[in-house]
Image: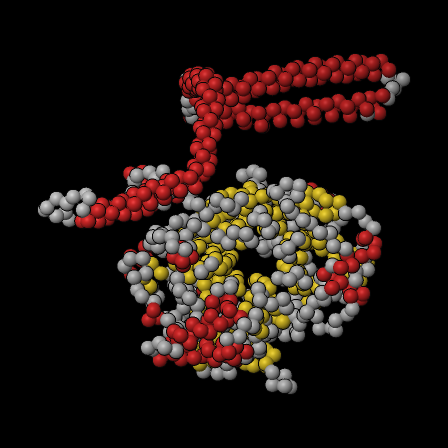
C-alpha cells in the first residue's frame, strides 16, 4: 500500500529548514514563510498524469538555437519534486509528484505548479539546470553566464511567483564577454551542498565555495598533461569533461578529467573545505595505508603512504584519536589543509590492461572514431566504471583494474591564501604528470609490488558500444549520459536519435566478490536497447532538450524526456530481469544438456535420507555354533537387534517424519504441476484451433508471393526496363528541335507582336482619320488603296498565326515522340 501525505505549505521545507550555506543569520519560521502560501492554500490542487501536465501543454513553442551545448531543462531532487525551467517566461516551476498512482507504472503531477523567479535579470539563455544533493539550491547554466538560485530562505512574492535570491558565480572569469574563457562542465560536489566544480577552456579546474566567496575560487588546479620536454598533439591538452568520484575508497577524493583525444587523468586527493564524509569510509583507507603502505618493502611506497596518512590526519583531525579509541563517530568534516611543499600529481593518462602477451595487446585496443565529447563515472559495488562518449556515436566502457592512491610531487610548492587567523582559505597549484615506464600491463603481471608506488591504475575494457546514430553531421553528435537511480548497472545514453539503455553484465571485482565465475579475458559484452526514438524521418531529428531518470522506494523507475517541441514523454522501465545476459554460450548450453537433469527432490528430502541407511557392520561369527538360549547367543541377538534398531528403525522413523512434514509441500508442487499441465493443454487446444487458420494464411501468402513473382517477371519484360541511350543522329535531331523551339518560334512571336503593334499605331494615328475635301476623290482612291493594304496585312497575319499554331503543334508532337523514345530506350 502506498501512502501520500499532503503537507501544508506552512510546514514545508521552506518554512522549517533554512539553507545551511546562507551567510545571513537564520530567520525565524514566520519570516521564511512564503508570501504566496496563504493564497495558494485556497487553490484546489488537481492531479494529472505527468505527460499531460498543463505546464507542458501550454508552453509556447520556441526554437532552440544553441544545439552545440548539452541541454537539460529538468531536474529532480531525488524525492518527490520535479523542477522545470521555462525558457519563455524565464521562470522555474516546481511540480510535486506521486509515484505509482493510479497504477504502479504511472506518475501523477500536481497542478498548478509553484513558480520561482530570480530576483535579478538573467542576461543569458539557460541551457542546463542541476540541483544539489539536498535540493536547496539550483544551478542555472548558460553559454554566457552562471547563476545559483536559492530555493529556500528569505524570499518575496510577485505576480504569483516566489522571488528567490540568485547569485552569480565567477562572473569575472566566465560571464565576461571580453574574456575568451568558457565553461566546459559545471557540477555540484557529491559531498557538499555549497561547492561547485568548474572545468574551463583554459585547462583549469576550480572549486567554488558558495558559502564564503562567489568570485574567488577556493581551490584551483592548473592541468598540465604534457610532461616537460615532451611534445604532443593539440587535442591531448584540451580538456572536455570531468566527473567527481563515487563512494569507494580513494575515489571519493578523486576528480576524473577527460581530454579530447580520449585520455583520462585523475586528481587525487581533492577535498572541498568543510565537506562531510562517513567515518567508516575514511577509517577504511586510513587503515589500509597503515597496514599495506607503511609495511611495504619499497622506500618510495612507504614515503607515499606516510604522506597520505599525514594528509588524512591533518584534513580530519579527529581521525587518529577516534581510530585509537575505537570511537563510533558518524561523520567527519574536512578541515582546510594542503601540503606546503608538494602539489597533487595529474595521474595518467590511464593505460589499458590486457590479457595475454604484451605484443598482442596492441591488437586488442578498441579504437573509437572522432573526438571525445563526454564522460561519466559510476561506482558499482566494488567497481569503478568509466564511460567515454565520442563524436562518432560510440561509447567506450572501461573499469579501473586497480585502486586509486594519492600521489604528490614534492618540491612543487602550491600557492596558499590564508586569513588573519592563519587559516587556509584558498589553494592554487600546478598539476603535472609523471613519466610512467609501465605503459602496458598484462593481467598475468602481479600488481602487489606496485602498491603505493605512485603508478596510475590501469583500465580494463568492458566493451565498445556503437549507438548507430542516423544522419552523421560534420560537428558530430551531442551525447549525454545518465545513471539509473535504481539499477547502478544501467546507464542511459541521450543523443540526437533518442534514448538508449546500456546494461553492464560483467563487473570484475563485483563478480569476484559475489562468487560469479566469469572469464576476465572475454567479459560479457554490455547490452544496448533503444528506449525512446525521436527520429521521425531520415532527415528530421527531434532531439531531447530535457531528460531525467526517476525512481521510487518500491523498485519502480521511469524516464522523463522533453522534446524540442516541449512535449513531455514518460516511459516506465523494468529492472528485475535486466542483469540476465541476452546471449547464451552455445558450448555451455550443450554441456548443460548432457548433464543429468535435477528433479528438485534434494530441496524437499535431505541428502542423508536419499542416501539410504548406513551399512551395518556385523560382528565376526565364531566357528562353533551358539545356542539361542545360551548367554552368548542372547548377547549376540541383543547386539543384532540393537544394530537393526539404530540403523533401520530410526531411519524408517526419519523417512516417515520427512514425508509427513513435506507432504503439504509435495501436494502443493503436484497441484502446481497439474495446473501448469492444464494450462499447457488449453494452449495446445488453442493452437490446434488456430492451425487451420494459420495454414490458410500460409497458403494465401504463398499464392500472393507467386502472383508477385509473376508480376515482377512481366515488369522485367516491359520495353521501358531496357533503356538505351540516344544515338548520335537522334541527339542531333533533338538539338535541332530544341533550337527551333527556342529560337525560331520566339522570332515568329516577336514578328507577330511587332506587326500587331504597327497595326494598332497606324489605326490610332490622326493622319488616318483626317479628311481633305479638296482631294476627296484622290483621298478615296488613296483610302481604298490603304484599305486594300490593311486587308492584305490582316490576311497575311492570319496566315502567319495559323502557321505558327501548326508549328507549335508539330513541336509538341516531336517532343512527345522524343519522350516516348527515351522511355522506351
Above/below status of 240 relative to 815: below
- Quarter of the image where one finds residue 134: bottom right
Query: Residue at coordinates 65% horizontally, 47% vertically from top-left?
Result: 2
**Residue drawn 63% across the image and 19% down it:** 804
- Which residue in the rendered view is the most extreme toward the right? 773
Q: Quadrant of the C terminus?
A: top left
Q: Position of residue 181 (x, y in %)?
A: 59, 67
State whether residue 207 is above or below residue 161.
Answer: below
- What residue do we see at 44% from left, 18% from top? 695
Colour theme: secondary structure
Q: Nearer the viewer, residue 790 or 179?
A: 179
Give percent across and percent down for residue 656: 38, 40
Q: Nearer the viewer, residue 659 or 110?
A: 659
Q: Is residue 159 visible in the rendered structure shown here? A: no
Residue 303 visible? The answer is yes
Most extreme residue toward the left is 623
Q: Nearer the viewer, residue 780 or 203?
A: 203
Q: Is residue 609 left or right of residue 625?
A: right
Amino acid at each position: 500500500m502506498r501512502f501520500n501525505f499532503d503537507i501544508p505549505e506552512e510546514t514545508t521545507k521552506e518554512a522549517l529548514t533554512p539553507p545551511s550555506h546562507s551567510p545571513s543569520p537564520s530567520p525565524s519560521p514566520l519570516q521564511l514563510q512564503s508570501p504566496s502560501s496563504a493564497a495558494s492554500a485556497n487553490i484546489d490542487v488537481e492531479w494529472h498524469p505527468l505527460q499531460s501536465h498543463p505546464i507542458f501543454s501550454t508552453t509556447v513553442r520556441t526554437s532552440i538555437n544553441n544545439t552545440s551545448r548539452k541541454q537539460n531543462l529538468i531536474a529532480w531532487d531525488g524525492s518527490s519534486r520535479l523542477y522545470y525551467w521555462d525558457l519563455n517566461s524565464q521562470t522555474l516551476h516546481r511540480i510535486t509528484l506521486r509515484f505509482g498512482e493510479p497504477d504502479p507504472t504511472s506518475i501523477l503531477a500536481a497542478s498548478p505548479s509553484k513558480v520561482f523567479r530570480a530576483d535579478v535579470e538573467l542576461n543569458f539563455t539557460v541551457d542546463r539546470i542541476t540541483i544539489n544533493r539536498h535540493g536547496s539550491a539550483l544551478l542555472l547554466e548558460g553559454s554566457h553566464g552562471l547563476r545559483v538560485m536559492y530555493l529556500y530562505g528569505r524570499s518575496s512574492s510577485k505576480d504569483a511567483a516566489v522571488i528567490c535570491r540568485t547569485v552569480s558565480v565567477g562572473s569575472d572569469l566566465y560571464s565576461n564577454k571580453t574574456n575568451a574563457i568558457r565553461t566546459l562542465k559545471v557540477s555540484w560536489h557529491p559531498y557538499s551542498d555549497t561547492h561547485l566544480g568548474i572545468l574551463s577552456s583554459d585547462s583549469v579546474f576550480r572549486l567554488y565555495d558558495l558559502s564564503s566567496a562567489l568570485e574567488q575560487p577556493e581551490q584551483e588546479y592548473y592541468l598540465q598533461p604534457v610532461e616537460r620536454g615532451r611534445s604532443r598533439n593539440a587535442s591531448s591538452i584540451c580538456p572536455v569533461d570531468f566527473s567527481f568520484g563515487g563512494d569507494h575508497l580513494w575515489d571519493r577524493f578523486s576528480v576524473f578529467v577527460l581530454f579530447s583525444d580520449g585520455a583520462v587523468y585523475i586528481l587525487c586527493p581533492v577535498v572541498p573545505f568543510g565537506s562531510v564524509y562517513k567515518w567508516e569510509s575514511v577509517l577504511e583507507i586510513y587503515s589500509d595505508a597503515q597496514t599495506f603502505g607503511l609495511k611495504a618493502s619499497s622506500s618510495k611506497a612507504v614515503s607515499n603512504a606516510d604522506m597520505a596518512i599525514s594528509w588524512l590526519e591533518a584534513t580530519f583531525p579527529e581521525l587518529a584519536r577516534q581510530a585509537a579509541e575505537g570511537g563510533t563517530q558518524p561523520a567527519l568534516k574536512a578541515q582546510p589543509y594542503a601540503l606546503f611543499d608538494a602539489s597533487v600529481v595529474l595521474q595518467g593518462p590511464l593505460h589499458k590492461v590486457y590479457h595475454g602477451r604484451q605484443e598482442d595487446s596492441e591488437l586488442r585496443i578498441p579504437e573509437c572514431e572522432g573526438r571525445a565529447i563526454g564522460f561519466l563515472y559510476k561506482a558499482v559495488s566494488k567497481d569503478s566504471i568509466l564511460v567515454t562518449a565520442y563524436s562518432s556515436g560510440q561509447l567506450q566502457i572501461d573499469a579501473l583494474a586497480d585502486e586509486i592512491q594519492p600521489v604528490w610531487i614534492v618540491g612543487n610548492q602550491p600557492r596558499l591564501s590564508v586569513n588573519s587567523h592563519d587559516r587556509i582559505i584558498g589553494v592554487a597549484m600546478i598539476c603535472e604528470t609523471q613519466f610512467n615506464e609501465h605503459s602496458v600491463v598484462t593481467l598475468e603481471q602481479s600488481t602487489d609490488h606496485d602498491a603505493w608506488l605512485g603508478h596510475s591504475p590501469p583500465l580494463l575494457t568492458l566493451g565498445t558500444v556503437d549507438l548507430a546514430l542516423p544522419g552523421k553531421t560534420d560537428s558530430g553528435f551531442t551525447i549525454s549520459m545518465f545513471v539509473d537511480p535504481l539499477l547502478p548497472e544501467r546507464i542511459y545514453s541521450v543523443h540526437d536519435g533518442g534514448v538508449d539503455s546500456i546494461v553492464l553484465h560483467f563487473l570484475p571485482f563485483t563478480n569476484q566478490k559475489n562468487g560469479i565465475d566469469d572469464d576476465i579475458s572475454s567479459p560479457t559484452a554490455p547490452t544496448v536497447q533503444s528506449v525512446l526514438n525521436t527520429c521521425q524521418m531520415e532527415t528530421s531529428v527531434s532531439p531531447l532538450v530535457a531528460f531525467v531518470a526517476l525512481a521510487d522506494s518500491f523498485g519502480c523507475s521511469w524516464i522523463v524526456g522533453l522534446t524540442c517541441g516541449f512535449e513531455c514523454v514518460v516511459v516506465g522501465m523494468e529492472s528485475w530481469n535486466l542483469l540476465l545476459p541476452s546471449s547464451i554460450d552455445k558450448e555451455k548450453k550443450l554441456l548443460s544438456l548432457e548433464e543429468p537433469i535435477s528433479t528438485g527432490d534434494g530441496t524437499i528430502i535431505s541428502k542423508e535420507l536419499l542416501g539410504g541407511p548406513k551399512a551395518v557392520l556385523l560382528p565376526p561369527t565364531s566357528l562353533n555354533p551358539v545356542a539361542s538360549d545360551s548367554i552368548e547367543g542372547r548377547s549376540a541377538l541383543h547386539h543384532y537387534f540393537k544394530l537393526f534398531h539404530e540403523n533401520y528403525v530410526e531411519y524408517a522413523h526419519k523417512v516417515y517424519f520427512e514425508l509427513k512434514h513435506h507432504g503439504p509441500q509435495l501436494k502443493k508442487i503436484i497441484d502446481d504441476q497439474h495446473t501448469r499441465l492444464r494450462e499447457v493443454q488449453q494452449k495446445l487446444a488453442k493452437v490446434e484451433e488456430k492451425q487451420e487458420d494459420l495454414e490458410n494464411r500460409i497458403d494465401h501468402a504463398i499464392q500472393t508471393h507467386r502472383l508477385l513473382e509473376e508480376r515482377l517477371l512481366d515488369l522485367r519484360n516491359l520495353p521501358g526496363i531496357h533503356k538505351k541511350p540516344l544515338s548520335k543522329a537522334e541527339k542531333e535531331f533533338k538539338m535541332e528541335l530544341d533550337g527551333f523551339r527556342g529560337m525560331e518560334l520566339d522570332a515568329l512571336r516577336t514578328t507577330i507582336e511587332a506587326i500587331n503593334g504597327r497595326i494598332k499605331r497606324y489605326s490610332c494615328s490622326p493622319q488616318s482619320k483626317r479628311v481633305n475635301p479638296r482631294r476627296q476623290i484622290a483621298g478615296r482612291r488613296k483610302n481604298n488603296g490603304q484599305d486594300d493594304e490593311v486587308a492584305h496585312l490582316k490576311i497575311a497575319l492570319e496566315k502567319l498565326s495559323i502557321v505558327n499554331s501548326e508549328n507549335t503543334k508539330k513541336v509538341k508532337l516531336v517532343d512527345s515522340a522524343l519522350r516516348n523514345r527515351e522511355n522506351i530506350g
